[in-house]
Image (cartoon, helix red, strand yellow):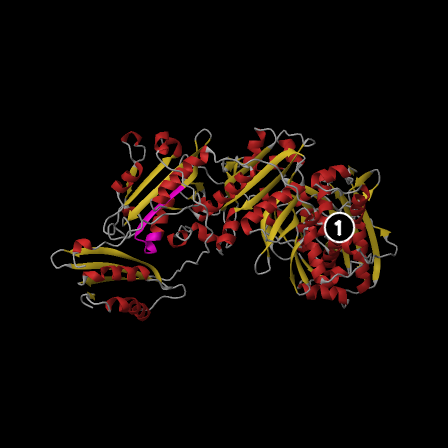
Amino acid sequence: MSNLDNINPPSISSELGRLHPINQTKDYLLKLLADIGFEEVHGPEIETEEFNFDMLNIKKSHPARQMHDTFYAEDKQNVLRTHTSPVQIRSMLESKPPIAFTSAGKVYRKDDDATHLPMFHQVEGIYVDENVTFANLKDLIHKILHELFGDNVETRFRPSYFPFTEPSVEVDILSENGKWLEILGCGIVNPIVLENCNLDSNKFSGLAFGLGVERIAMLKYGVNDIREFYKSNLDFLAQFK
Amino acid sequence: MKINYQDLINFLSEKPSKEDLSQKLFQLGHEHEINGDIFDMELTPNRGDCLSLNGLARDLAVFFGKSNSIDLFDGDIEPLEINFENLSPNDCPKISFLEIEIEDSKVEYKPYLQNYFYTLGVNKANLFTDISNYISYELGQPTHCFEGESIKKKLIFENRECNAIFKTLLGSEVSLKDRNCVFSSNNEIISLAGVMGGASTACSLNTKKVLVECAYFNPESIIGKSIKYNLVSDAAHKFERGVDIASQEMVLRRFAKVVQDHAKIKSIKLKSFTEGYKQSPTIPIDVDKINKILGTSLGRNEYLKYLKALNFEIADEIKVPSFRHDIETNNDLAEEIARVIGYKNIRSAPINLSKIANDSYDNKITKLESLLVDNGFTEVINFPFTSKKKKESINIDNPLDSNRSSFRTSLKDSLINNLLYNERRQKESIKLFEISDIYTKDIEIKQQKKLGLIVSGRLANNYNDFSKKLDNKYLKNLLIKDSTEDVFKIIEINRNSLDTKKKDKIYYVEISLENIPKSFFSKLRANKKAINFVTYKPVSDYPSSTRDFSFSIEDLGQVNKVITLLDRVSDEMIKDSFIFDFFKNNKTKIVKIGYRCIFQSYIKTLSDEEVNAKVQEILDPILKIEGVSIPGM
């Protein structure tokens, strides 16, 4: 073969881009929940105290409402939402049970250190119907965790405290190195919250859960430093194909 | 809160091992870490009642039984005549005072008191303050010790407007502002109630007579004060979470007992003031409701047995213990039951919902994402904060710092910063995008979902595109397929005002998704890839080193072999490699291949020698091929 015309040039593979690992993880969680039957609802990141706190039974004296924990905006007329729960409140006010909603997106807390960022992402879900029990919540959480971490993952339900759920638990999984890792918070919707949304708490009950997207992404990808996600470093982002 | 295991088991009738204790603490919802004998407890804010040995033991009693070993002073106590007025019983519905005088303040601490300071690393102050701290550890009720001779005039508790400098007993000065609950005497603030006492009435090593104040303050009256005045206060931590409103006299009898263990008491007097005391709530007995919440099938007797073990009084209704401020409803009681039986013992029951199809809202975004990812764009997510304040900006009242005091009104600055950051990291072909809600204000707050994208540098790292640049034309081809849909305004960003020495032009597009016509989306595919959770490799922060090689191949039969060998080059030290030039010289019948190799280590800056050695390794097999050379080498 000595003819130049017969020589094939090297092949060119066009380089694909990629979505941000946090959005990939968020979309994955939303898809997982949509497959179970949860519909995504949307709402604003700039909220009012009423929707972010009052409607969720977070009292005026609750530490989370202090200026050192929550960003206030526009002369205290607004707050940057501290969770995606107010989206669920807005949606519940406009619907009648049975309802199964997810809300996902950016949330804000007044933090900035090695393990906390002023902005991070949550995926939350709520299901309200007649006769929803903790047994239902337990089954649902196991479904989610088995999907995420495999059927053999060992879980621990640890009593906790959130004003908007009662009972409230945090769920841990046992990691490979034998340590329990906190994965999500959940509980039975506090009847006060249902009443705030004009739902009869004697007739209806609900379950709710929330996951930190960064936390799940860190565990699934093995990223140790949460700040890496927000440096916009192509060497970092290029890995999440 | 740190607790010594040895102290805690003294309060339990069974003596569980540390492992058993730890497991049950977790079951009850009390997170902790263990270091030797010390349990570092992280309690949820609703469980102020557990912030002591006695409190934790009360909760653990359901598993291990509680020993009733709190020794109280059982002698006679005279009534105290005290000139005191409570001007704000709403903030302080219950307060007791114990006046106690001892013969000698120079005492040797008994082992239990000595150990408290030794094992938990608490600093000693003086006998009465030390006992006060110990009692708080043991029973969870803070007390404050006023030097017995220091208050000559009427003592007043009030919630009032303050504008004064207050010197704390630890010596720091705080400037009190707005309304605060304070104790005052002779027009001087002598204690910031529930937080910290003042220097002027503090006890010393010589104090023989003390006035011990022991109160229930409403959590709402105390909350936020220690943070506002930057005072680290165990008392405030406890009052904010609620102490036992029924325990003050018992606590003072315990105080007196510890004093008695250490010194001869000359006189002891007590007086309590109660006003507006709220009785603990009662809840109807309704085991069906509990079962309905938990999905259990608990019997009535079993239910009540658990509640009794948790100190609830059972009569016609369930009476909540005075220290449990967190219990008001059947949902609260359901949680109590779940803690005792353990969540792992509650069965699972599936819910029946049907699968939801993707909605159109996301479809738009998915289509844009697919278009951009297929064309080599990388998505970024930026914090929305900026120092640039515009008329329409949403302003943060309490920003982390002045550089982050407003919400961004555009994605542009963030994306320019992302571009420059990656240029500094030696990236030569950059295509980034971000899709985010942008908030601005007019009459009301306006929310818009926007797409921003930025490009600069080489078109791509291959021999066709290496010498071409990302430009206006590239973006036009990508976005504007039909002139009627020309909604994308491509702008060039001037580098003059940027902190950069690079020359490549920067092009930028920003658009609100609602302004993109439907017809544009109809031409796009929504291509959602399944996620692949790859294991991430830490990014190297060491500089990279680039080497270019120009191979000259005279034996055309060897061209494929060279390309194959170059394709196979792979090494820990090689971050990237590609053929950037491929040229067939028709005159000389020689093929030229330009090859770039970028070296970088995860652990150090590579020396020239190390790179050269690696280069030799790569080149050797190629240069051994007949008719292949690198001219000039």
What amino acid is labelled 1 in the image? Cys
Residue B588 in magenta stretch: no
Kindly tell me whether residue A204 is visible in this rendering.
Answer: yes
Mark 1 crowdedness (10 Å alpha carbons): few <14, some 14-19, many ≥20: many
Percent x, y of residue B304: 80, 44
Percent x, y of residue B471: 26, 44
Front position in the image: B589 or B193: B589
Kindly tell me whether residue B176 is visible in this rendering.
Answer: no
Percent x, y of residue A48: 54, 35
Residue under the image location 45 percent in, 28 percent down? B443
The subunit carrying tag 1 is B
- Is A85 positioned to the left or the right of B440 in the image? right
Q: Quadrant of the C terminus of chain B?
A: bottom left
Q: Which residue is mark 1?
A: B214
Up/down of B153 relative to B521, above or below: below
Local secondary structure at mark 1:
strand
Up/down of B555 relative to A51, above or below: below
Q: Quadrant of the N terminus of chain B?
A: bottom right
Looking at the rendering, the stretch of residues picked out in magenta corresponds to B422-434
- Is B98 positioned to the left or the right of A132 in the image? right
Residue A84's image quarter? top right
